[in-house]
């Protein structure tokens, strides 16, 4: 056996190991702490909404919104001018645990206006967020409001798009069944499910009310057909209809805050490799959650069961 | 075009300088010599099949001079004084051989050498074998196809899964054949089959690689700091060559396994009865999954989730023709396809089809004993067309990659001290990606780019102990009008015949990126640079030490550091790409990887194999991931980071007929995100009234899964099959002690407000495998 290699190998070992030890930089992941969670959605031309305040809980704990409610906070929403000064102030009061409503009659949310939320908790935590409300969506035409499920005619909206911000407009369909969920039994409601959802629905596991409203992913405006007059035409996909009968079909245009929350929360469900869960983008100073806005328009679409089903 | 001209000019100038230097050295050498020197050259072949052996070592003992065969199996050794020499040839898995030659002054002797495989040579000792190698390059691994077939394998022997045993190479999971080499993702590895780029080298949606071991002659892996002759990726290269076909006799084989069956035939054609030499040879190997009967039984038993149709196949074929003693032609083709038709729930259907086609035509010419040329035309196409129909709404994604290229290389040995390689590789690449949603085209992108790469490299051996290889590669990429220069340098010093020290550096550019899922490779799509999307690049440094010991032992260690900058990948946070400017569909990041690899091999004796250990770390930094309180992203460890990785591969010849194989792997658990806080938004207008939008708050990838370990065992019996054919029967047990390794955790929000952590396992139980191979 050669002896020289032993000597050199030992030296090489030490050098290489030292090289490894010195070679890299360290990674740091910030350990999160429990935070105040705000939740409010300003909808253009609808009354100023309530604000919900909660405290995030350990991931292993059960989350109960009432138990997690942040009580006794000072909550104010202000409408801002373009220079950031407040043009109107709307104080809020806690009406049920963690839920705060405008002290006065809530005024309608003004499209394209900017609003600020200020929260001061009883232990002097400051939470602040701002949103700019998207412009309204003007409906030009709605076609095929009475359709046979998966028939040749598909419900179709023609809209004039909202005024674009720095990014192109993004929309999400939301479809809400108008069946009477209070009066009908689960079995009766299940009879009205379209085939795909009927197969998904497990009466032992699922609450059928979860199927009442569904939403599409966020879809860029350029996906849809743009007409010569600047309007766009959107076909409502059949996959959105969970129930036969009357459905409220809404087209929603989210602001930046809501857009960021939805897209990054979607990524938590599997946008990266399995097991990798990124945090959401929340645009909340001093807390987390959502202080967002959207504009929307809707129409009632009646979906009939095909004769063969 | 100005840039291209500059690039061409620069590269030509460099080549010229090198050639002048080499010519000068040649002239000086000629003047210094008292008598014209002699030279040896020729091919090294397998004695039983006539297949050329790539990377075999040839050593002229008395002169202590050696060379390795090139990718055509050709070697040349010059500057030999007249005299009698012992020429020794060696190759992993073969018995070394020696021949004595007497060279006259000025003679250029063609000396073709033939080696017997170890298994054939057991009773025919030609030379007491050792594995002395004249040219062991840093970062290079070579895998024998025999070993690939012998290693215990999940259902089917696999080239990439065998590579995963080597130090510095990691697997994402038991279900993935993807190669994570020295901290790089799979798209950072260039995969070549007969010099043709293969864009999606997977079957079974990532479970297996596309390379049929029956068809493969040689697998070379450049783990990093690779020379200037390769480029286009910032990580590593897997260079695979199909068999040329048996030039001695017609042979065939049939292998039946649980998942797939294989068959091949190879042989000579145009055999001259007088000289007993063949004009050429051919090889055809086919493989197809054979799951249909099992699926039919399961469907008959009303087992849920059984596909209506599921198969894969591949075909490799190659034909060679010897035009003259110095000219050889070959044509190689590959075709592979995966198909899955799956009906799920009521009104849901997935139809997924994807596959690769490649073809390459090669002409090699030995212009003189000092000049070897090779011209290759290649074509590669990858196409996937997944279609989903859910509740009357159709989702489609059509993705097609086409790459047509022409390569020309020459290897020139002007003097014994210099070996010059130069070449060009130009081609046209197109990516066509089209998505539709509900009958409307939601995304369409057709990107085409021409590319041209030129390289020149000189391997300079100032003394027998030193080898210095310097090279420069220039690459032009039409899409985005990028041209880049990539210097490469490696130095090797033989402290003594048993100890080599090496160091290497290289800069690398990559113009492509792959969007892939660890779960399912059927949707893989490639994207490329453009305006606002610059190529990714990185530097690699490596140092290594290689030692050889008596008794067939080898110990090697390498340390590496590599940077990754301007990494670009499709932004995973974008819900929809429609209408976005191309550069805005990407996120840009950077990374670093460093590690130390060790391998102890034994190539002789009843027990052979190796133990490999890697200590390593890889890190990434991308926007919106692992954000610090100041809103800036910190580095994080990606999922494929493993601090410790230990592999043991052992082969034991129990008798002439029985052989046992065992493999063991231990690795630090994968990083994963362990959620620490959570909340549920109650009033989301896009959610049902009783539903919530559930949010986790977590330090990104700040925890580790339990350590991974697995033992696989195999026993192999060889013999005759009823006197009709040679037989090889394999019994294997994967995960022999039933380790329940974890693939990942899935966190599910329950209706009562709690979060359940579900464990998704890797292969959780011992999995037997039986395979029968007959060779005619």
Image: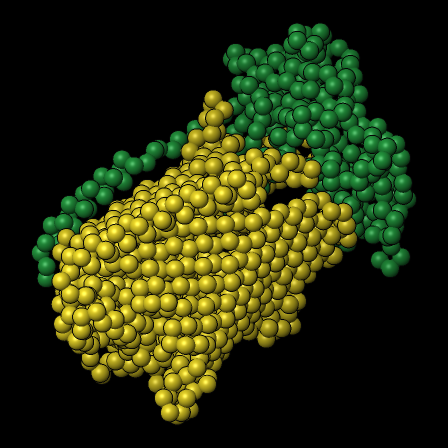
Relative side of B177 to B304, left or right: left
Quadrant where the N terminus of chain B is found in the figure: top right
Q: Colour of chain A?
A: green
- Which residue sits at x=42%, y=68%? B364
- Most foreground residue, A80 or B434: B434
- Most foreground residue, B411 or A225: B411
Residue B107 makes an appearance in the image: yes
Relative side of B418 to B752, left or right: left
- Most foreground residue, B17 or A222: B17
- Which residue sits at x=42%, y=33%? B635
Quadrant where the C terminus of chain B is found in the figure: bottom left
- Which residue sits at x=47%, y=32%? B626
Q: Quadrant of residue A168?
A: top right
Q: Position of residue A156 (x, y in %)?
A: 85, 41
Relative side of B672 to A293, left or right: left
Q: Position of residue A214 (x, y in %)?
A: 73, 40
Q: How is the image coloured?
A: by chain
- Which residue sits at x=15%, y=65%? B35
Q: Colour of chain B?
A: yellow
- Most foreground residue, B399 or B394: B399
């Amino acid at each position: 056996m050669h002896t020289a290699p032993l000597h050199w190998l030992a030296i090489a070992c030490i050098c290489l190991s030292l090289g490894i030890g010195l070679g890299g930089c360290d990674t740091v992941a910030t350990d999160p702490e429990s935070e105040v969670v705000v939740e409010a959605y300003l909808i253009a031309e609808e009354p100023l909404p309530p604000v919900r305040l909660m405290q995030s809980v350990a991931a292993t704990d059960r989350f109960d919104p009432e138990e997690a409610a942040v009580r006794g906070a000072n909550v104010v929403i202000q409408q801002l001018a373009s220079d950031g000064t407040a043009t109107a102030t709307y104080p809020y009061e806690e009406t049920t645990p963690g839920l705060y409503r405008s002290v006065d009659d809530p005024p309608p949310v003004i499209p394209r206006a900017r609003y600020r939320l200020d929260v001061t908790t009883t232990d002097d935590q400051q939470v602040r967020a701002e949103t700019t409300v998207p412009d309204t969506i003007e409906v030009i035409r709605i076609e095929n409001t009475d359709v046979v499920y998966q028939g040749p005619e598909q419900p179709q909206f023609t809209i004039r798009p909202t005024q674009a911000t720095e990014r192109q407009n993004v929309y999400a369909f939301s479809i809400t069944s108008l069946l009477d969920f209070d009066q009908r039994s689960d079995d009766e409601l299940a009879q009205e499910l379209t085939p795909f959802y009927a197969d998904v629905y497990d009466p032992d596991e699922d609450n059928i009310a979860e199927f009442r409203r569904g939403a599409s992913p966020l879809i860029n405006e350029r996906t849809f057909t743009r007409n010569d007059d600047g309007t766009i035409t959107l076909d409502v996909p059949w996959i959105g209809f969970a129930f036969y009968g009357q459905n409220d079909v809404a087209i929603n245009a989210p602001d930046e805050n809501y857009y960021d929350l939805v897209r990054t929360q979607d990524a938590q469900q599997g946008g990266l490799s399995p097991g990798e869960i990124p945090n959401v983008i929340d645009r909340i100073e001093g807390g987390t959650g959502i202080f967002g806005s959207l504009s929307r328009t809707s129409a009632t679409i009646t979906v009939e069961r095909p004769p063969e089903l | 075009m100005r840039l291209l001209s500059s690039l061409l000019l620069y590269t030509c100038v460099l080549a010229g300088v090198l050639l002048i230097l080499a010519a000068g050295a040649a002239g000086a050498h000629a003047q210094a010599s008292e008598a014209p020197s002699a030279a040896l050259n020729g091919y090294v072949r397998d004695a039983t099949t006539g297949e050329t052996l790539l990377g075999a070592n040839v050593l002229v003992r008395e002169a202590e001079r050696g060379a390795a065969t090139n990718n055509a199996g050709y070697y040349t050794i010059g500057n030999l004084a007249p005299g009698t020499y012992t020429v020794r040839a060696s190759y992993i898995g073969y018995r070394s051989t020696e021949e004595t030659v007497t060279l006259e002054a000025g003679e250029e002797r063609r000396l073709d050498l033939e080696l017997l495989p170890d298994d054939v040579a057991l009773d025919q000792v030609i030379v007491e074998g050792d594995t002395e190698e004249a040219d062991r390059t840093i970062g290079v691994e070579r895998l024998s196809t025999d070993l690939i077939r012998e290693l215990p394998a999940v259902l089917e022997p696999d080239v990439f899964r065998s590579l995963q045993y080597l130090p510095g190479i990691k697997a994402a999971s038991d279900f993935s054949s993807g190669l994570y080499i020295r901290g790089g993702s799979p798209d950072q590895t260039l995969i070549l089959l007969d010099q043709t780029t293969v864009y999606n080298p997977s079957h079974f949606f990532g479970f297996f690689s596309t390379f049929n071991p029956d068809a493969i002659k040689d697998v070379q892996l450049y783990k990093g700091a690779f020379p200037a002759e390769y480029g286009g990726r910032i990580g590593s290269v897997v260079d695979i060559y199909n068999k040329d076909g048996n030039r001695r006799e017609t042979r065939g084989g049939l292998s039946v396994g649980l998942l797939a069956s294989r068959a091949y035939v190879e042989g000579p054609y145009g055999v001259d009865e007088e000289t007993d030499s063949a004009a050429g040879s051919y090889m055809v190997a086919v493989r197809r999954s054979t799951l249909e009967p099992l699926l039919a039984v399961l469907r008959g038993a009303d087992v849920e989730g059984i596909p209506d149709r599921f198969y894969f196949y591949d075909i490799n074929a190659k034909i060679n023709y010897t035009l003259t003693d110095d000219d050889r032609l070959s044509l190689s083709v590959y075709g592979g396809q995966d198909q899955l038709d799956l009906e799920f729930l009521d009104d849901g259907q997935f139809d997924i089809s994807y596959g690769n086609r490649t073809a390459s035509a090669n002409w090699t010419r030995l212009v003189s004993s000092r000049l070897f040329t090779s011209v290759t035309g290649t074509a590669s196409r990858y196409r996937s067309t997944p279609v989903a129909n859910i509740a009357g709404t159709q989702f489609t994604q059509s993705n097609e990659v086409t790459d047509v290229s022409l390569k020309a290389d020459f290897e020139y040995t002007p003097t014994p001290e210099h070996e010059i390689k130069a070449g060009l590789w130009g081609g046209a690449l197109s990516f066509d990606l089209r998505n539709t949603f509900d009958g409307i085209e939601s995304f369409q992108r057709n990107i085409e780019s021409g590319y041209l790469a030129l390289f020149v490299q000189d391997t300079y051996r100032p003394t027998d102990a030193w080898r210095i290889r310097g090279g420069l590669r220039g690459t032009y990429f039409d899409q985005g009008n990028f041209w880049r220069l990539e210097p490469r340098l490696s130095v090797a010093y033989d402290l003594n015949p048993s100890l080599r020290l090496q160091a290497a550096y290289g800069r690398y550019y990559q113009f492509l990126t792959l969007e892939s899922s660890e779960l399912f490779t059927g949707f893989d799509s490639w994207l490329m640079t453009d305006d606002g999307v610059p190529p990714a690049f990185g530097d690699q440094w490596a140092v290594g030490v290689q030692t050889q010991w008596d008794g067939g032992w080898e110990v090697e260690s390498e340390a590496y550091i590599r940077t990754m900058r301007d990494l670009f990948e499709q932004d995973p946070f974008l819900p929809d790409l429609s209408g976005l400017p191309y550069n805005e569909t990407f996120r840009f990041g950077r990374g670093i990887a460093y590690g130390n690899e060790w391998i102890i091999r034994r190539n002789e004796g009843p027990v052979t194999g190796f133990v490999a250990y890697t200590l390593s770390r890889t890190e990434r930094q991308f926007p919106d991931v692992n954000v610090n309180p100041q809103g800036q992203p910190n580095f994080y460890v990606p999922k494929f980071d493993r601090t410790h990785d230990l592999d043991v591969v052992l082969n034991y010849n129990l008798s002439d007929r029985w052989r046992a194989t065992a493999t063991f792997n231990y690795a630090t658990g994968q990083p994963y995100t362990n959620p620490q806080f959570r909340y549920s938004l109650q009033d989301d207008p896009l959610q049902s009234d009783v539903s919530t939008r559930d949010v986790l708050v977590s330090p990104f990838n700040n925890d580790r899964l339990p350590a991974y370990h697995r033992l696989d065992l195999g026993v192999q019996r060889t013999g005759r099959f009823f006197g009709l054919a040679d037989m090889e029967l394999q019994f294997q047990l994967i995960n022999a002690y039933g380790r329940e390794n974890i693939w990942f955790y899935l966190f599910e929000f329950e209706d009562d407000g709690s979060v359940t952590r579900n464990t998704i396992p890797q292969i959780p139980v011992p999995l037997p495998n039986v395979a029968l191979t007959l060779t005619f």
